[in-house]
Image (cartoon, helix red, strand yellow):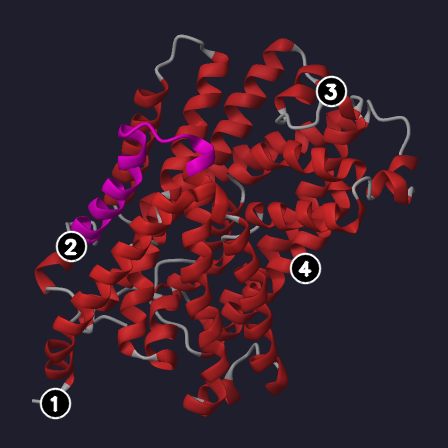
Amino acid sequence: MPEGTKKLLGFWDLMSISLGQIIGTGVVVLTGISISMTGYGAPWAFILAFAIVAIPTICIAALGSAVPNTGGNYTYVRDLLGSRISFLYLSLLVAGQVILASYAIGFAEYAQALFPDVNTMAAAAAIMVLCYIANLMGIKTAARFQSIMVLVLVGSLVFYIMSGFSYIDDYSHYTVPENVFPNGFAGFFAAAFLLRLSLIGSEFVSEFGGEMENPGKLIPLVMGLSLFLVVLLYIGIAIVATGVLPLSQIEGKNLAATAGVVFSPPVYVAFIGGGIMISLVTSLNAIFAWCTRGLYMATEDGWLPKKLAIKNRFGTPYIYLTLFFVVGIMPILTGLSLSYVSILANAVGAIFGLFPVFALYNLTTRNPEAYAKAPFKLPLWATKAFPLLAVVIYGYGIYSSWDFIGNTGWFTLAAYIVVILGYIHLRAPHVAAASQPD
């Protein structure tokens, strides 16, 4: 942990950041698509999605408990897979934060639904700037901002569920196999894999390992509890989304379709503005809250010049934060679509997400003492089997995105990786020299 770092974050700060990171474009965009794939099986598909996400999440939780540190995922890869691989991971993580644009664009599109004259590009850029400024003012300020937004968000979604249940008369649809698997198990699994995207995010709590009290217990607790609570919330949302209107009227549509039925016009506007739009802002803000930690640790290791890691008076490494801001706002300014940005970011995320998950594979051999003392510890066989299973899951996700992203997108990513590998080769001697004792 860098000298002078203070223990700032408690349980509720971390819960708000984790919930804000998980709850985002997934539930407000993907629910309707999953209904078109599996009908009344959508609530059940969220349960399978939970099982899919649980494997890599457990891997990161086990690492966070055993070797907590600021810049968590980066340090896991560095210490358990190697320094060069850790910087490649970090470089892919930076590229993957084009996902920031998807939250901002989604926010802008919902804003336009309420106010048709809104310029979506301007609205998306404005909300990006707001979250950037909030995090420039320091992690504690950002965490409080996050706590307020998450409270409003969860309250809105719970109100949607409670209001919607009163419109549902028949729950038998959810127990009939033909209704749950209208396109067979393959369609059901495809829907669950899609919904997986709405549940990722809690693993980034490990980025704050050096900035919390008792991280060995808090990291797995916050990750597990926030993911479980979100799954329960999503199941309720899926039941309302499928139970209020005939399936033919909601397939492929977002939550606004049923919200227009269960709410009066003023409440509908409040729900879209205070629930859906807030969910997109919380995800955007949560990424800004953790994204600089890995770069800061890479600077400590010598991979980046120390002058890039200078902090402002709030303790924020503002140059690195600005880098992520630029990565996030570029897709907005270049006019990329929400669907393309989301799928591209997910594919890149699946690639870099493999690195820290697979780091668990080496934990027991490279740091057996930390494994033995971890408050949350997996059986020895699970430290080997879970990362391999995660590779299969993530590999399928990358494969499923191939055609949509297209050759140009993949070529650009490949060229970026080649450039990073060249930088690693040139910078490695400096890193090795910096690591030598004086």
Task: Classify residue 331 as left or right of residue 167.
Answer: left
Seen from the viewer's position, the closer of residues 56 and 202 is: 56
Q: Nearer the viewer, mark 1 or mark 3?
A: 3
Where is residue 337 drawn, in percent x and y? 41, 30
Seen from the viewer's position, the closer of residues 113 and 370 is: 113
* Distance (Cα) linking label 1 and label 4: 46 Å
Dot 3 corresponds to which residue?
Answer: 249
| Whether label 1 touches label 4, CB < 8 Å | no
Relative to 349, say whether 277 is above or below: above
* Distance (Cα) linking label 3 and label 4: 29 Å
Q: Judge the density around disc 2: few (<14), some (14-19), many (≥20) Cα neighbours within 10 Å.
A: some
* Distance (Cα) linking label 2 and label 4: 40 Å
| Quarter of the figure that contains the N terminus | bottom left
* Distance (Cα) linking label 3 and label 2: 52 Å
Dot 4 corresponds to which residue?
Answer: 51
Q: Residue at x 36, y 36 (%)?
A: 101
Among the two numbered marks 2 and 4 on one chain, the one whose residue lies closer to the N terminus:
4
**Region in magenta:** 316-340
Q: Residue at x 49, y 66 (%)?
A: 219
Among the two numbered marks 3 and 4 on one chain, the one whose residue lies closer to the N terminus:
4
